[in-house]
Amino acid sequence: MDEKTGDLGDMKSRDIGNLLAKGLVNLGKEALQNNAPKDQIDYGDLPSRALPELGKQVLANKLNQENRME
């Protein structure tokens, strides 16, 4: 990806999906870390879709809050 122009033309759709999923996983991890003590988080016990789904919820909440502020 060309960082200056943001051209994604050379990337495969799978690569773009992986970038999006990674961001959602990171948002999910942040939400868990903010709501639970670190010594109680065990990512191995979570279903594989749990972190991306939690990340989607976090993103949706942020967008709803921004829309309410406008």
Image (cartoon, rainbow, N blue to C red):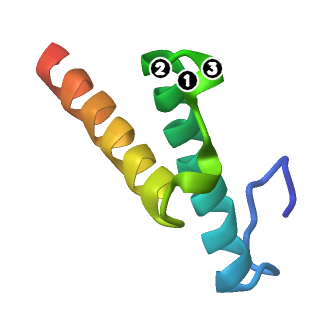
Please give the residue where the numbered disc 1 appears in the rendered image: 33
In the image, residue 44 lies at what x, y percent? 64, 54
The alpha-carbon separation of the residues under discs 3 and 2 comes to: 6 Å
> From this viewpoint, which residue is outermost toward the left?
68
Numbered badge on residue 36:
2
Q: Are marks 2 and 1 in contact (CB under 8 Å)?
A: yes
In the image, residue 55 lies at what x, y percent? 44, 45
Residue depicted at 64% across the width and 21% down the height: 39
26 or 9: nearer the viewer: 26
Please give the residue where the numbered disc 3 appears in the rendered image: 38
The alpha-carbon separation of the residues under discs 1 and 3 comes to: 6 Å
Secondary structure beneath disc 1?
A: helix
Mark 3 is surrounded, within 10 Å at the Cα level, by few (under 14), some (14 to 19) or many (20 or more) other residues, namely few
User: Which amino acid does the dot numbered 2 rest on?
Assistant: Ala
In the image, residue 56 lies at what x, y percent? 37, 50
53 relative position to 70: left or right: right
Q: Are marks 3 and 2 in contact (CB under 8 Å)?
A: yes
User: Which amino acid does the dot numbered 3 rest on?
Assistant: Lys
